Image: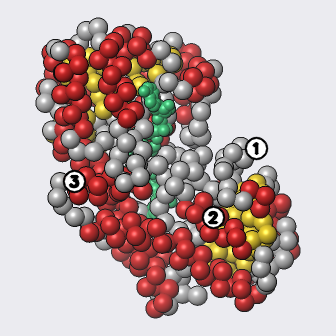
């Protein structure tokens, strides 16, 4: 099959590489010329474990190419995936301007029958709108079919998830187009759910929103556990032993971030509102998540106030919204830096994916220091905060850290460490909802 994937971000690039590995002839296309020139050279424009090797391998086969010429990319393929961003607008609705720009390109370039596959996360009604829009612009509805094929990969395990999907959801009206997609995905052997456009779109939002709900739910249990002297880690363990509940997505912490949960929860609330439905549960999920980093931070600030005068020096471990990605979008760690900065002399950040010089636009950048080593971050620090559970932070020698720090306090924002071990090393260990 000749396939073009428009949008070479986390989803589009992963999709293009994996489809090439399934023996298709694939073109990855993007308007961002710097991304395309990196990809052509075999360099991933983002961090994603394992994907760089498969990219190099696929480029060598000649089955995978990248271009910034969107028109040619459309004309050379029979199946066109759309994987452009759908960010939040101010009012929480999804901004579909990139999708519309691609629709215009397709309408202008179409040179024969195409299956158009919407991989981007789009609000209910968008695939139907796209089909009508293209029909109007092209003037011949027989020249294309639109299939909704939402993506469920996680950053940090994008390649594994794409090669081993739990399910493939295909929504659309054309049996012919759906058969083509079933054939494309057949080697992956996943369960396939065939449905209509609206249901496929809602499955995607419902899935992300449900996972976000699990996270906010356990974060509320964490708040109760904190007051009641219970241990939230064991609460999650006990809940997770019930197969109806499941053990995953019950890690309490500073809250969920990333390019998807925050925007997709907001967009689903906005879509529902447009349809005259109020999503009370999801509104609460959002509120809990928004306040969660500050709830954690309060404990550290109180302890610091009792121990040492402001302004403080704080070491911040991890800036990305989760480990194994360089994605800082909506990371709760950023919220923590912004909140703490006015009371600090310096916040020293260490994260294995930060490029030097750091490009993040901090409110007071003189006070933000990006460190290359843990020792540098800990030197004379009044406290440390673990925001992202990167593997490198599991290897910290805490006896040494205690010697480096002015005040050996650690706020564990992900319940990552064993409290007894850290306390034995001389750290004043602050967790939440773990009975201290
Ligand atoms: P991204 O921001 O990493 O990449 C989007 C790419 O689209 C960018 O490279 C941009 O230059 C390109 N683009 C924008 N307009 C274009 C145009 N007119 N023509 C060609 N290229 C254009 O986004 P992402 O994280 O890959 O997400 C893409 C979509 O997939 C979103 O709807 C997102 O919600 C969804 N999604 C993302 C993930 C994830 O883990 N990141 C997982 C599942 C679904
Ligand atoms: C999430 C979904 O898991 C994917 O299925 C989906 O395709 C994707 O969003 C998307 O639509 O973009 P991702 O955002 O990459 O994937 O990361 P997750 O592993 O889901 O984590 C999201 C956030 O929740 C992270 O900040 C993480 O730290 C937090 N989290 C997760 C918790 O706080 N506790 C948990 O138990 C699990």
Residue named by callout 2: 338
Residue named by callout 3: 274
Q: Is residue 332 visible?
A: yes
What is the secondary structure assignment of the residue under circle 2? helix
Sooner in the amino-acid sequence: mark 2 or mark 3? 3
**In this view, the mark in front (3 or 1):** 3
Looking at the image, residue 290 lies above or below residue 9: below
Measure the C-alpha gap from mark 1 to mark 2. Answer: 20 Å
**In percent of the image, x 52 and y 46: which residue is there?**
156
Q: Can residue 207 be seen in this view?
A: no
**In percent of the image, x 40 and y 48: which residue is there?**
89
Sooner in the amino-acid sequence: mark 3 or mark 1? 3
**In percent of the image, x 31 and y 71: which residue is there?**
242
Sooner in the amino-acid sequence: mark 1 or mark 2? 2
Looking at the image, residue 52 lies above or below residue 301: above
Mark 3 C-beta to ligand 1 under 8 Å:
no
Measure the C-alpha gap from mark 2 to mark 3. Answer: 33 Å
What is the secondary structure assignment of the residue under circle 1? loop
Measure the C-alpha gap from mark 3 to mark 1. Answer: 44 Å
**In this view, the mark in front (1 or 2):** 2
Relative image position of residue 275 (x, y in whole percent): 17, 54
Q: In this view, does 195 lie to the left or right of 152?
A: left
Q: Quadrant of the N terminus?
A: top left
Mark 1 C-beta to ligand 1 under 8 Å:
no
Q: Name the quadrant where ligand 2 sits.
A: bottom left
Q: Is label 3 in contact with label 1 (beta carbons under 8 Å)?
A: no
């Amino acid at each position: 099959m000749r396939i073009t994937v428009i949008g070479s971000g986390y989803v589009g690039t992963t999709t293009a590489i994996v489809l090439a590995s399934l023996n298709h002839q694939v073109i990855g296309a993007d308007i961002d010329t710097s991304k395309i020139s990196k990809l052509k050279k075999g360099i991933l424009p983002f961090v994603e474990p394992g994907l760089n090797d498969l990219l190099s391998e696929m480029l060598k086969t000649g089955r995978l190419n990248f271009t910034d010429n969107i028109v040619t990319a459309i004309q050379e393929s029979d199946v066109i995936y759309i994987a452009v961003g759908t960010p939040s607008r101010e009012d929480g609705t999804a901004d579909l301007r990139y999708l519309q720009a691609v629709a215009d390109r397709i309408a202008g370039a179409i040179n024969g029958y195409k299956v158009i596959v919407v991989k981007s996360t789009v609000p209910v009604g968008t695939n139907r709108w796209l089909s009508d829009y293209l029909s109007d612009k092209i003037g011949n509805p027989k020249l294309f079919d639109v299939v909704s094929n939402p993506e469920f990969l996680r950053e940090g395990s994008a390649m594994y998830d794409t090669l081993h999907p739990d399910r493939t959801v295909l929504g659309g009206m054309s049996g012919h187009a759906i058969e083509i997609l079933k054939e494309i995905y057949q080697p992956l052997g996943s369960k396939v759910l065939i449905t209509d456009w609206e249901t496929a779109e809602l499955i995607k939002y419902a899935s992300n929103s449900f996972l976000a709900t699990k996270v906010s739910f356990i974060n509320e249990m964490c708040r109760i556990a904190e007051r009641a002297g219970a241990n939230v880690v064991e609460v999650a363990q006990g809940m997770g032993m019930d197969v109806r509940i499941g053990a995953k997505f019950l890690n309490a912490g500073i809250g969920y971030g990333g390019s998807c949960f925050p925007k997709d929860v907001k967009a689903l609330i906005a879509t529902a509102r447009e349809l005259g439905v109020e999503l009370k549960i999801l509104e609460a999920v959002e509120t809990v998540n928004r306040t969660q980093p500050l709830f954690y931070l309060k404990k550290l600030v109180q302890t610091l106030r009792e121990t040492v005068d402001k302004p403080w020096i704080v070491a911040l471990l991890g800036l990305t919204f989760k480990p194994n990605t360089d994605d800082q979008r909506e990371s709760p760690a950023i919220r923590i830096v912004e909140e703490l900065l006015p009371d600090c002399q310096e916040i020293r950040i260490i994260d294995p994916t930060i490029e030097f010089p750091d490009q993040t636009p901090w409110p007071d950048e003189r006070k933000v220091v990006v460190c290359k080593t843990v020792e540098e971050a800990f030197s004379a620090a009044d406290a440390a905060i673990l925001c992202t559970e990167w593997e490198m932070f599991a290897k910290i020698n805490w006896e040494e850290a205690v010697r480096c720090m002015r005040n050996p306090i650690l706020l564990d924002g992900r319940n990552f460490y064993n409290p007894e071990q850290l306390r034995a090393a001389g750290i004043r260990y602050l967790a939440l909802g773990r009975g201290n």
